[in-house]
Amino acid sequence: MKRRSYLWLAAISAVLLGAGRGESSRRPGFGGTLRVEIGAVIHSLDPAGAADAEEAAAKDEIGALLYEQRNADGSFAGVAGSGAFHIAQWESGKRLTLAANENYRGGRPFVDAIEIEMGRAAKDRLQDLELGAADFAEIPAEEARRARERGVRVSESRPEELVALVFAAGHGAGENAQARGALARSIDRAAIVNFILQKEGEPAGGLLPQWANGTAFLFPTASDAAGAKESWAQIPGSPRMALGYDANDSLEQAVAERIAVNARDAGIALSAEAIAAGGSPASFDARLARLGMRSASPREALDGFVAALAPATGLDAALLPAAASAEQIYGREREIVGSYRVIPLVWLPRVYGLGPRLRDWKAPAPGEGWPLADVWLEQELP
């Protein structure tokens, strides 16, 4: 009911405002098919099925449209189709069509259906948004500036995805705390943000962004090549380190190669190497990881990062108490960052491209899915 009440108010406002501008030929309304393009290729809609990081993230977004509730651990509860949409057509690895759930307790979605086309490269998504052939698509943060220059409507969240360098427990030079610290000091985060990300994002020194708990400024982000070089020179044996990155992620590759340049300038022997699809990061001393906040709550977000990182890094997997104070949260964050098992690099926003007819889009907060049940498509009056 809340969507229907809103729609009547929106329609009346559109008519009154449009009449004064000579634009009454357009109005909001139910109906239409929302055209969505994603880069991921989804092979199974089973939420528990195996998937790489990109596919898992896409499955989670779709699951949020299909299921009404989540369990405490973030998994979906109930049956597919209990949410705002149900599956109408499914072609594994190619496309998915969702139809509006007329009986959804949150109110029927505005659009009749969502067509999701998979495996679309970023440049193709941008082109289709520019031409009006797509209504909605996620855009890599580093492409946001180019999208705006091409006239695409762009929406951004607050910085909520952390790119970090993660050391594997019990592996080579990564077991040397001084070596980890020297590498951390050598990295020029500002250059990563300014040149690779085209100023979309911000340097990260801690595991929580400034907007979340207000303490990020206490974690330094400036590089110290001279200090890194001096520290590395004190390590006997001149150890070598191998840094792995996802072979299918161009951003990870660019960041890894930049880190290798910074390391070389500090006298650190580090090579950046691709981790092939299906390959194991276990053969690398460290790898790049992209970690999304699972909640806007500082405690829940930090617990989510610990749960994701502890198995590979050997970090203490203990979670914070539900009533953890700001001091306790900061202390836990300081403990992890101070170990140099995890080296925060940059924070990224989630960036969305919006087609010309999409209306009432609002960027989701951390832990929320695409709010596609609340958008509507502008349509011409007959």
Image (cartoon, rainbow, N blue to C red):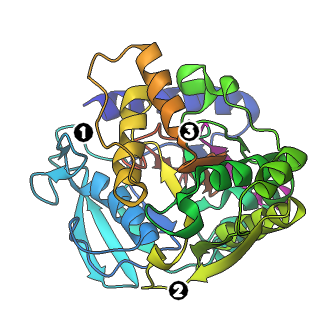
User: Is disc 2 surrounded by few (<14), some (14 to 19) or many (20+) residues within 10 Å?
Assistant: few
Marks 2 and 1: in contact by CB < 8 Å? no
Q: Position of residue 193 (x, y in %)?
A: 79, 50
Residue drawn 71% across and 45% down? 201
Residue 144 picture location, percent across and down: 74, 55
Q: How far apart are marks 1 and 2 (CA)?
A: 44 Å
Label 1 packing within 10 angstroms: few (<14), some (14-19), many (20+) = some
Residue behind mark 1: 107
* Three-letter residue code for mark 2: Ala
The residue type indicated by label 3 comes to Val
Label 3 residue SS = helix
Image quadrant assignment for residue 17: top right
Point out the frontmost of discs 1 and 2: 2
**What's the residue type where badge 1 is placed?**
Gly
Q: Residue at x 66, y 56 (%)?
A: 179
Foreground residue among 258 and 170: 170
Residue 86 in view of the camera: yes
Callout in the foreground (3, 2): 3
| Rendered residue at 57%/32% (across/down) | 15
On the rendered structure, is 289 left or right of 68?
A: right
Dot 2: element: loop
- Where does the magenta region start and end? 147-158
For label 1, the SS is: loop
Give x and y (percent) for residue 364: 48, 40
Q: In this view, does 307 lie above or below 15?
A: below
Mark 3 vs mark 1, CA separation in Å: 44 Å
Q: In which quarter of the image is residue 366?
A: top left
Q: Distance between the residues labelled 3 and 2?
A: 28 Å
Q: Mark 3 points at which residue?
A: 337
**What residue does disc 2 label?**
276
Q: Which residue shows up at 65% across the image and 50% down it?
A: 178
